[in-house]
Image: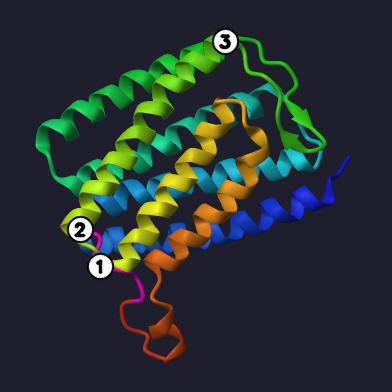
Amino acid sequence: MLYFDVFISTIIIFILTLILAFLISTNAVRTHKAPFLFWSAGLWIFAISVLIETVFSAGIINSILMDSYLFLVAILVELLALGSVYLLGNVNLMKGYTIYSIVSDIILGISLLITPLPNMIITGVVAGVLPLLVVITSSIVTFPAAALLIIISYVSYRKKADRKLISIILGVIVVSIAGTLYIAAFPAFLYYAEFTGIVLLWLGFVDFSKIFSGNKQQNMQKNVSD
């Protein structure tokens, strides 16, 4: 069964995310800056996870898709956090959190492989209660990442108080919290958070004044680094 309202919502979020992921990836290639690399990777993962939500809204459900979805919504938080960690520039923190991310992702992947999942699609929306082991291993990935994002965002803004940076920071946090809220069993907020987060990221990364004025130079923001 196709749940049309959910389907249309996820398609819109997917298209917005896909375009922004491409723009940030282009900027990452051009500038060779690690924050853009991790943020773009996070957004590509976000786009894939939203595409899977679209498949769910069309009534197509299987265990492989569900396992993939739960893994992706967790690691996208980590990737966005890694971008913010590299933006901060603390070498020890970068090394330590990179190692932690790899280990926690392996643990999450193993837990998803060995744990049978119930059907968690209700009226086309990802809902339902996760098995305890998956909740614990997902939380190991998402909650430290969300905490790091909030702390680093505050520090970054104190160093460079820019309105575009505020929008980027809030967008990264909201997109990350979308996955975290689901893991914490608040699925009703998932799609609202996804849409709000991607809009904030568009407002932060894309300079609409240059687009509307016909200036085709550098539409991506360059002031998100130290």
Q: Is residue 198 above or below residue 93?
A: below
Q: Front-most of 208 and 56?
A: 208
Location of the N terminus by quadrant is top right
Whole-angstrom CA distance, mark 2 to mark 3, is 39 Å
The residue singled out by tag 2 in the image is 225
The residue singled out by tag 3 in the image is 132
> Bounds of the magenta span?
219-226
Give the residue displayed 10% in from the left and 37% down from the top.
Answer: 91
C-beta proximity under 8 Å, tags 1 and 3: no
The residue singled out by tag 1 in the image is 222
Q: Quadrant of residue 89?
A: top left
Q: Secondary structure at mark 3?
A: helix
Q: From the image, state whether disc 1 or disc 3 is nearer to you.
A: 3
Picture mark count: 3
Give the residue displayed 78% in from the left and 35% down from the top.
Answer: 60
220 magenta-colored: yes
C-beta proximity under 8 Å, tags 2 and 1: yes
Q: Is residue 41 above or below residue 120?
A: below
Location of the C terminus by quadrant is bottom left
Q: Secondary structure at mark 2?
A: loop
Q: Front-most of 67 and 204?
A: 204
35 magenta-colored: no
Q: Is residue 75 above or below residue 168?
A: above
Dot placed on the residue nearer the N-terminal end, 1 or 3: 3
Name the outermost residue toward the left: 91
Q: Amino acid at mark 2?
A: Ser
